[in-house]
Amino acid sequence: MKKKLLVVSDGIIHPSIPARARFRKFLTGIAGVDCVFARSIEAVCALGEGGFDAVTVYLHRKVISDGALKALEDFVRGGGGFLPVHSASASFKTRDRYFDVVGGRFIGHGRIEPFSMRRVHDGIFNGIEDYTVRDELYLHEYDRTNTVHFVTDTDQGSEPQVWTRSYGKGRVCYYAPGHCAPTMKHPGTIEVLARGLRWVCGLEGKKGG
């Protein structure tokens, strides 16, 4: 039986229309997953009754209603999967409970430039070689109990770019790059997102990632 995924994605510049188009093309090509597309974060209110197995969020917004936030929390805590991408960690900045689910909070980024994605943990991404993207390098405050899989090495230290975590009975996988359309079609991005998606949907891998 296929898994049902709610895809919440919107934006003109951040994320850009071409980047979101690449993400949509990627998602529709994942075997075993049926996608339902929405543009408003309020669509997560349907998670509890819509037969969904997971939700992915790829947008940048300031406001989420109390009802939508609770619906997301309850869904993931109860065993649903969550794949936040790029600016999902920069959204809803006043909502600490949201970042408790994501596992980290965006605090800034530099200019668009190349940086390396270095794998530091095996788990569900075992065998994926290091790769380089040209994108915004996101910096985060993050939960140290996260399992960090990929980092970027900077003069200030290693910055997590991909992590997994458990939230209640649910699975969360965060992917930081994603501002530029070429990033979203990079083979490394596609492979990491594909494995992350399959993991949060419960199609493969152990709970810890």
Image: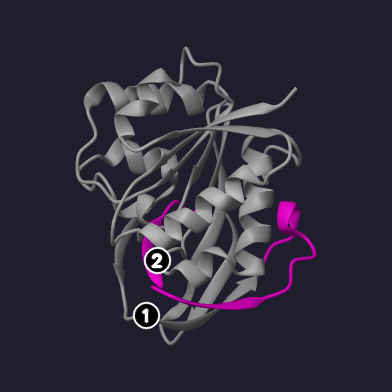
Q: Label 1 is placed on what type of residue?
A: Ile
* Vertical placement of residue 112 versus 176, above or below: below
- Say which residue appears at 41% left-offset and 19% top-offset: 46
The residue under label 1 is 112
Q: Which quadrant of the figure contains the N terminus?
A: top right
Residue 18 on the magenta span: no
Give the percent coordinates (x, y) of residue 72. Answer: 40, 28
The residue that label 2 is drawn on is 179
Q: Give the percent coordinates (x, y) of residue 75.
A: 47, 23
Q: Residue 164, position in %: x, y?
A: 58, 49
Q: Secondary structure at mark 1?
A: loop
Which element carries disc 2, helix, strand or loop? loop
Q: Quick one: which residue is furthest to the top in this view? A: 49
Q: Does residue 84 appear left or right of residue 67 in this picture? A: right
User: Which span of residues is magenta-colored?
Assistant: 120-145
Query: Residue 48 at what x, y percent from top left?
Result: 46, 16
Q: Relative to 150, does residue 208 appear above or below in the rendering?
A: above
Q: Which residue is more in the foreground, 60 or 19?
A: 19
Q: Quadrant of residue 71?
A: top left
Asked whether disc 1 touches disc 2, contact meaning CB atoms under 8 Å apart, the reply is yes
**Residue 134 shows in this picture:** yes
Q: Is residue 157 left or right of residue 207?
A: left
Which amino acid does the dot numbered 2 rest on? His
Q: Name the residue rendered at 37%, 50% in the picture.
A: 88
Q: Nearer the viewer, residue 34 or 118?
A: 34
Can you see residue 145?
A: no
Of labels 1 and 2, earlier in sequence is 1
> Real-space Cα distance between discs 1 and 2?
9 Å
